[in-house]
Amino acid sequence: MSTLASTTSSAEAVQFWLLGGIAVAGALGTVLLRRAVHAALCLAGTMIILAIFYLANGAYFLGVVQIVVYTGAVMMLFLFVLMLVGVSAADSLKETLKGQRLMAAICALGLGILLVAGIGQAALGTFTGIERANEAQGGNVPSIAERLFTEYVVAFEVTGVLLTIAAVGATMLTHRERTEMAKSQRQQAEERTRSDHLPPLPAPGVYALHNAVDRPGLLPDGTPSELTVSPTLRARNQIREVSPEKLNQVAALEQRTADYHGQPRYGQRSQGVAGGTDQGRAGAEQDSPTEDQVRVEPGHKPGDGESDHGQSSGEEAR
Amino acid sequence: MDPVNYLYLAALLFTIGAFGVLIRRNAIVVFMCIELMLNAANLTLVAFSRMHGNLDGQIMAFFVMVVAAAEVVVGLAIIVMLYRSRHSASVDDASLMKL
């Protein structure tokens, strides 16, 4: 690659047609894919291919800068902002302006025809090749540096100022002024002592079926407690419901476990009859709590009565 | 292969980028399409630089890259700020000055 011929080789032609197609596909993906993350990744691919084209055109410095600055810094910055804004956000396909897409397509087609016709019409002169200019100072980078720091030194300085201003501007734009004093640790402790709730808040989901942070924990009577979910999720309304069916399933599961071990549970089935355990096992295999209850209930009438009796006697004793 | 093909490819990429700017609503994707157009212009500059055996085109492309980097920083900061105040990155939602 050190000595480029003044006309392009057939290898370069193969590279151009192969990678050019991928570059156009990436560009189309950027424009047409609904999710912004996919669009960003397509654009990154197109930029890498453009970097290869720069290298093929003898612009070694620019090829490397393209990869480092564009795909390395700019596209990653895009991805960071996408994460900040919400990765899952997909564009809606609804047209807010009537016929806008058609008009845009016509405009783009017109622009493309204009550009291609312009290039086709232009007298581009002879093909010189970059290698002599590259070798003037012993390589692409020294040659660019020689130009940059003599002829273009003012522009170079001005871009330095521009970058500084951009950095300061971005910091100022995204900085948020704190409008109230931050609370000290002592203030926080005092506030907490004065509030109703002194101990740490209960953990989410530990009494429910799942232990995810967005599942409310269950109180002893089985109702979900919103206090167990983080206030952020509460404010966003992102608490996952613990459905009554699930609660019933939990209750049925506990029932079956108790049956299996022959323990009394909730006073409903006090004595495990010989057939009772079998029925309990059959219910566990079928995994349908309602059916289980329906089938078990008639067999355990005496048990229910007994437990009722036991409760009432307990109340009497009290 | 005629090196003019690079110019045709750049024209095609530029057109696709312009089309994306016109049809997309997500401000970040619109911004990405602008980047695509800038890259297409860079490819043109580099190809011309080779055709004429002159490094000025490459230096121009280098300056375009620097300016694009600065532009991305400020533009994304503006998008983040918009998102903070409107909870949306859609260009349709920034319609405060619409009658």
Image: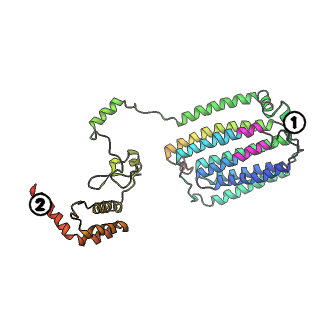
Q: Is residue B99 visible?
A: no
Vertical position of residue A218 compared to residue A286: above or below: above
| Between discs 2 and 1, the one toward the N terminus | 1
Q: Which mark is residue B41?
A: none
The dominant secondary structure in magenta is: helix
Kind of residue sitting beneath label 1: Arg
Vertical position of residue A270 compared to residue A237: above or below: below
Q: Is residue A49 magenta?
A: yes
**Crowdedness near tag 2: few (<14), some (14–19) or many (≥20) residues, C-alpha within 10 Å:** few
Residue A296 is drawn in which quadrant?
Answer: bottom left
Span shown in magenta = A47-65
| Whether labels 2 and 1 share one chain | yes
| Quarter that holds the N terminus of chain A | top right
Under tag 1, what secondary structure?
helix
Q: Which mark is residue A132?
A: 1
Task: Please state if A9 lies on the left or on the right of A85 as rendered.
Answer: right
Picture residue at 24% right of the left edge, 72% below the top: A299
Which numbered mark, 2 or 1, is in the foreground of this view? Answer: 2
Kind of residue sitting beneath label 2: Ser
Q: Is residue A317 magenta?
A: no
Task: Please state if A194 lies on the left or on the right of A306 as rendered.
Answer: right
Q: Which residue is mark 2?
A: A313
Picture residue at 62% right of the left edge, 31% below the top: A165
Under tag 2, what secondary structure?
helix
Picture residue at 59% right of the left edge, 58% below the top: A97
Task: State the residue in front, A182 or A219.
Answer: A219
